[in-house]
Image (tube, coloured by chain):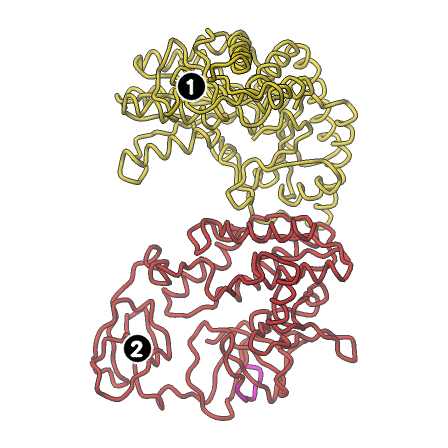
Amino acid sequence: MRAEAVEAMMPYLSELYANPSGSHRFARRARQAVDEARDTVARVVGCHPNEVVFTGCGTESDNMAIVGAIARRGGVALCPAVEHHAVLHVVEHLDGRSSGGHASGRGSVVGVDAFGRVDLDELAAILGATPDVTIVSVMAVNNEVGTITDIAEVARVVRRHAPDALLHTDAVQSACWLDLRDITPHVDLLSLSAHKFGGPKGVGVLVERGGPKVDPLLVGGGQERERRSGTHNTAGIVAAAVALDLTDRERVDENVRLVALRDRLVDGLRDRLDGITETVPREYKVAGSAHVCITGIESEALLFLLDEAGVCASAASACASGAMEPSHVLAAMGVDRSMALGALRLTLGQTTMAADIERAVDVIGAAVDQLRRHHPTPAVADVSAPTTLDPIASAS
Amino acid sequence: MKVMCAMSGGVDSSVAALLLQQAGHDVVGVTMKLWGGDSDTGCCSVSDVDDARRVAQQLGIDHLVFNFGDDFDEHVVAPYIDAHTRGVTPNPCIECNRSVKFARLAERADLLGFDAVATGHHANIGRSANGRYTLVRGSDAAKDQSYVVHMLDQAQLARTMFPVGGMQKADLRALAASIDLRTATKPDSQDVCFITSIGGRIAFLGARIPFRSGTVVDADGTRLGEVESVELVTVGQRKGLGVPGGGPKRYVLDVDTASATVTVGSHADLLRSELIVDRMSWVDGPVDGSVLMQCSAHGRALPATVSAAEEADAIVVRWDEPQRRIAPGQSVVAYDPTNTRALGGGICR
């Protein structure tokens, strides 16, 4: 977490601990903090404060958008195959429910191109053939490979072929890299997660433009204008707003700084190692993302050596057991399984410094050498794994 | 030494990790994610992984999960299914040891700079006077698992540790309880990990292969009855053959899935004087002469004489006394005449 965000939240864990929904003076101070946080978020996102709903995480925001849309209006949900599981599994689950337990095959999941961008022709075709699409969900930045999708372009297709459908974007990976004000006007719903921009874990945002579009997931005390019941996480909401504001102020400079570092990292790895491929060309990616496929190694083994050397890494996506799962993103992009085997995801962020880059290149280079020395031919398995240079911007 | 301890989430491997740590080794615990489908402990055996991780946390060692699901599907699950379509009764736990635990995991450990892989098996590794490794039965005779690790050769034994092989199970549980390991009273696993106790083998196979009804005949071809699924019939089986009761006891002598025919006969018809064993692996090179042969995980070892068969990697086992036919696909393991050392094993033809 950003130090400023930690500092901002501390009073609300001690002397200002009151429930913002209360009626006494301490409650009013907490309430003011939540209101001001909402104003800050609205300013950075580019919406009205009353369009901001604080939730418990990005996954909740995604679920609220999609489940809530279907609950309110029926019909089906669509998303590209590279979405985060917080969207993809919801869409697949709803599709299964609407057709008696099995995917209907009606194309609730849309294909992508080799860079991971939704196939707009296929999207248009499915929208044309499926009159009851209620919501389309397309991520602005892919968490695994860093690909940017032009949401304005997606919006044009959706509005033209399904004028009544809602458009949701999972912008969880976007806040550090893109101006959200450029995205928000094109969508009905937008999800954020505070821990992706230096805020605390356990705070999410759902933007509902133009008033309520979906049914709430949580019903109860009627907090968040009855959009999301549950006692406010005042400290978390305050810290999230501080982190988002700082991220927004620093975004342009950070993009410049981190593009340079990212390029040094990827160029350094390419100079150091044979058999390394950039999964997506840099011009299609956000600054903080480096994703490469390294031949002759398995990510799972590489991550162990990186961890041992003090380079902290985590899985692209892990199942409930903690085992790394084959990347659905790379599979959807058509990346060959033997390539995906050696996928390595590196994320740069606010705390990443030039020295980290030199060290990462050294450690990764040495680890790959060790694995290749022992293991001249790649074995089976298919794992995509990120290495996180920056704990704040860590993608998942 | 730097030791990778395979931790299943059971008490044996929990104590194995503890003993390694107490012996001063640098221990990392690894749980293999092998099966992604239903199991008795949840999808991907999540609760077992949780137990392994919590034990590792208590011991203060690192714990990792390696996903060897593809290997498990390829080398264990797919052959298991295929074997049933051929009327063969495989032992998937042995194939998992052969192809995953002591192959894939051991290679990974080697690659990552570990000196050895340890497991919670009840077996012991000894050294003979000439320095060769021996595979010795576990000290707790009732828990001995040398049968399921019989495929280890000299190179593998040199890099394998069985820390609990010398313990009695009761002492092992007492040790686990004494430091409050959460797995101390966890029941031993009994069954194949990818077969649920509710659905069993029938539900697992039924979802993957079509069952065909089969005709039950006696040795001269007389039709005696019908079985619902010939794929589920095993040589030696006596019950569930759709043959009216009251007559002499009838045993399955042979299963021919191609013609969906189950041949039955008397106990005497089931007796065989010899047995061919394929895919032999040897702990320390081929052996012939007098041995004791064990044909199931906790079966009695029976006296026999073994010699090389015509085919490479196959042996002929001549029983001292005629024995019931062993179901094709079963693993049989040779022990020395004192019944302490496993010499090698293979798969019954």
| Chain letter of the yellow region | A
Which image quarter holds the N terminus of chain B? bottom right
Looking at the rendered structure, which numbered label has been put on residue A55? none
10 Å crowding of disc 2: few (<14), some (14-19), many (20+)? few
* Residue A211 falls in image quadrant: top left
The residue labelled by disc 2 is B239
As drawn, is A274 to the left or to the right of B243?
right
* Residue A111 falls in image quadrant: top left
- Image vertical order of residue A134 relative to residue B270, above or below: above
Marks 1 and 2, Cα distance to the nearest angstrom? 65 Å
Answer whether residue B304 is magenta in the image: yes
Q: Are discs 1 and 2 less than 8 Å apart at CB? A: no
Q: Position of residue B251 (x, y in %)?
A: 32, 82
The residue sitting at 61% across, 14% down in the picture is: A242
- Disc 2 marks a residue whose amino acid type is Lys
Answer whether residue B18 is magenta in the image: no
Q: Position of residue B257 (x, y in %)?
A: 32, 69
Query: Chain B shown in which color?
Result: red
For the magenta stretch, what is the residue range? B302-309
10 Å crowding of disc 1: few (<14), some (14-19), many (20+)? some
The residue sitting at 50% across, 17% down in the picture is: A20
As drawn, is B264 to the left or to the right of A204?
left
The numbered mark 2 sits on a residue in which chain? Answer: B
